[in-house]
């Protein structure tokens, strides 16, 4: 296929390219078993197998599959046994799901400003911070704060990334969360996963995600005398099967991203008005990140790439201080829950009212990389990006 023909097609992110009927043995298996509920299978469920595989691969003691990463974040937060109105420090630059997860648990998000890499700056956290969500955005590994009892690493956009010490993102704190939404590194349309090495935390999450039950697979659930209420976040066998298929390709996806990133970094021009933001060795190389001298140049680049059919995006949408959900503090509850429980102090931590972060976001542009392409096509694709940017 010629490049121009390929560029004319819709962009498929990462793992979605690896979905193929010829490769769906796990899905075939669960359909042939005719049991799609994980706790009623004859042998070990696909969901349990997936959890074991993920925990082993990422270096965590336990994993739990749920419906999406927002639920995963909620479950992690609830499992810390908070009180209504407790604050949770969250990144000022992240997807609004993080704030929604915090609020829907009856907790209050406090926005913490970003560093130069647009990740949360942990030096801004107050010494008494108890709950912090760190988001590793766009495959970029954020600094994980120390000495905070509950650090939840949101790895929705960074499955497979590694911290500077070699551990996987998601395994340094209390728990890590992952998304299998269509746009993420791997996909099952929707899907979420939690890893933790805290056995009791895992037990609390498992119980809450299954109506507060003590479950023996194959049996009707039972409730201990000291049971608490829960909800139903239990995943389904066919979803776990697709996730297992995707997971088989994780190393291939990560290697394909590394390869195209290296190719592009060789080709990209050295210009005073355009910086390619370097990535750390452990980052998942999901995109090239550009920083322009001005917003006008950035917007011109967006137009030029879009006109050539080259996928690209900005990160403006992630600036939570300007997000309607947070600015207006509205709620569907008649009493404004949980905002009605917010402490009487500023719910943001920034040195300059987010001015610097706003400026960085205004000038940032991301071009996703294509792990599925053979090397020759990656070279052609990277050259095309360079050509388009040259005339901006
Ligand atoms: C996508 C995303 C989420 C939410 O994931 P879902 O699986 O769609 O619920 C949470 N945090 C970040 C940073 C995300 O990018």
Image (tube, helix red, strand yellow):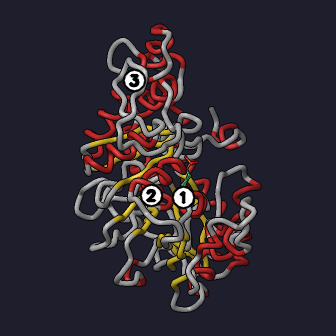
Tell me residue 40's x, y (percent). 42, 17
**In-image side of 77 versus 96 (left or right):** left
Residue 152 occupies quadrant: bottom left
Disc number lying in front (2 or 3): 2
- The foreground one among 345 and 125 is 345
Furthest residue to the front? 225
Answer whether residue 376 is visible to the viewer in this image.
no
Dot 3: what SS? helix
* Badge 2 or badge 3: first in the primary sequence: 3
**Which residue position holds label 3?**
46
C-alpha gap between disc 2 and disc 3: 26 Å
* Badge 1 or badge 2: first in the primary sequence: 2
Tell me residue 314's x, y (percent). 64, 64
C-alpha gap between disc 1 and disc 2: 7 Å
Query: The C terminus is located in which quarter?
Result: bottom right
**Which residue position holds label 2?**
77
Q: Give above or below for 358 relative to 180.
A: below
* Badge 3 or badge 1: first in the primary sequence: 3
- The foreground one among 159 and 212 is 212
Dot 2: what SS? helix
Residue occupying image coordinates x 48% and y 21%: 37
Residue occupying image coordinates x 32% and y 58%: 174
- The foreground one among 269 and 242 is 242
10 Å neighbourhood of mark 3: few (<14), some, or many (≥20)?
A: many
**Which residue position holds label 1?**
105
């Amino acid at each position: 296929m010629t490049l121009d023909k390929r560029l004319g097609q819709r962009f498929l992110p990462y793992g979605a390219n690896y979905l193929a009927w010829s490769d769906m043995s796990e899905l075939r298996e669960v359909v042939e078993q005719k049991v799609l509920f994980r706790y009623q299978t004859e042998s070990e469920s696909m969901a349990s197998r997936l959890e074991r595989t993920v925990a082993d691969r990422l270096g965590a003691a336990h994993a739990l599959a749920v419906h999406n990463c927002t639920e995963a974040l909620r479950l992690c937060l609830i499992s810390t046994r908070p009180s209504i109105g407790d604050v949770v420090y969250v990144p000022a630059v992240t997807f609004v799901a993080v704030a929604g997860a915090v609020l829907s648990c009856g907790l209050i998000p406090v926005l913490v400003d970003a560093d130069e890499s647009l990740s949360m700056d942990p030096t801004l956290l107050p010494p008494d911070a108890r709950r912090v969500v760190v988001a590793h955005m766009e495959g970029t590994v954020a600094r994980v704060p120390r000495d905070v009892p509950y650090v939840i690493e949101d790895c929705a956009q960074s499955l497979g990334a590694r911290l500077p010490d070699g551990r996987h993102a998601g395994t340094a704190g209390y728990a890590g969360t992952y998304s299998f939404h269509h746009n993420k590194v791997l996909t099952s349309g929707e899907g979420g996963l939690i890893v933790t090495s805290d056995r009791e935390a895992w037990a609390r999450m498992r119980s809450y995600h299954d109506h507060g039950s003590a479950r023996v697979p194959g049996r009707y659930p039972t409730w201990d005398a000291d049971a608490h209420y829960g909800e139903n976040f239990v995943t389904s066998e066919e979803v776990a099967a697709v996730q297992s298929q995707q997971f088989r390709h994780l190393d291939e996806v990560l290697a394909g991203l590394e390869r195209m990133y290296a190719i592009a970094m060789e080709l990209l021009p050295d210009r005073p008005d355009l910086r390619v933001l370097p990535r750390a060795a452990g980052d998942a190389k999901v995109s090239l990140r550009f920083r322009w001298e001005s917003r006008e140049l950035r917007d011109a680049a967006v137009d030029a790439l879009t006109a050539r059919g080259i996928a690209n995006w900005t990160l403006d949408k992630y600036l939570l201080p300007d997000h309607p959900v947070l600015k207006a503090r509205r709620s569907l509850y008649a009493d404004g829950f949980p905002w009605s429980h917010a402490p009487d102090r500023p719910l943001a931590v920034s040195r300059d009212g987010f001015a610097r972060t706003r400026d960085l976001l205004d000038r940032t542009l991301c071009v996703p990389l294509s792990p599925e392409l053979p090397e020759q096509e990656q070279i052609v694709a990277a050259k095309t990006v360079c050509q388009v940017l040259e005339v901006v």
